[in-house]
Image (cartoon, rainbow, N blue to C red):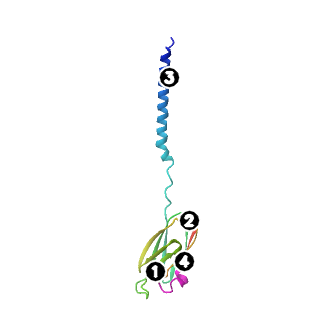
Amino acid sequence: MALPDHGRRSKGRIIAVLAGGGVIVALAVVLAVAPLLHRPAPPASPVAQTLLISMAGFSPGRVRVPADRPITLTIVNPDSRFHTDGGWHQFAIDALRVDVRVAPRAQQTVTLGPLRPGVYEFYCDICCGGRSNPSMVGRLEVTG
Ligand SMILES: [Cu+2]
């Protein structure tokens, strides 16, 4: 026995509503999962480097670091306050507007960058000889 015409139509409507509901559920699942699939990369961990600055100069005098990552520099001053100039040292990079003063027998931490590739000169200009003393100048070499 054939269904009356309006019965067939309401069956079709039910299927359409169910299909529409299925599409909505599928869309909700995609929207819920999408942020998990497109999670941004975690920020690059900083490169840690220790730099000694004493009356003998910077050690190392050349610091090589990668570009596009933050750089955490620990500047250690092993000199005592009994030096004629008080034992203080400086870590300065004019191009980066960095000027850190390190007290005798102390250390300072400075975070730079991420930096563009290039060579950045650092110096100490507050102890004997200062910047004109070749050992009171160094190079931060950033390689890409
Ligand atoms: Cu110095």
Contact, CB < 8 Å: mark 2 with mark 1? no
Front label number (3 vs 4): 3
Q: CA distance from mark 1 to mark 3?
A: 85 Å
Name which residue type carries label 1: His
Residue 138: give its label: 4
What segment is highlighted magenta in the picture?
127-137
Q: Residues within 10 Å of mark 1 (few under 14, many from 20)?
A: many
The amino acid sitting under disc 4 is: Gly
Residue highlighted by disc 1: 89
Whether label 4 touches label 2, CB < 8 Å: no
**Looking at the image, which is closer to me, 63 or 97?**
97
How far apart are the alpha carbons under marks 2 and 3? Answer: 63 Å
Number of other residues with Cα within 10 Å of mark 3, as a class: few under 14, some 14 to 19, many 20 or more? few
Percent across and percent down for residue 7 are 47, 17
The residue that mark 3 highlights is 12
33 shown above or below 104: above
Q: For residue 51: magenta?
A: no
User: Number of numbered discs present?
Assistant: 4
Give the residue type that dot 3 points to.
Answer: Gly
**Which quadrant is home to the C terminus?**
bottom right
User: Height in image: 131 above or below 48?
Assistant: below
Among numbered discs 1 and 3, the one appearing first in the sequence: 3
Instruction: Give residue 67's mark.
Output: 2
In the rendered structure, which disc, 2 or 1, sits on the residue that comes first in sequence? 2
> Which of the 4 quarters of the picture holds residue 79?
bottom left
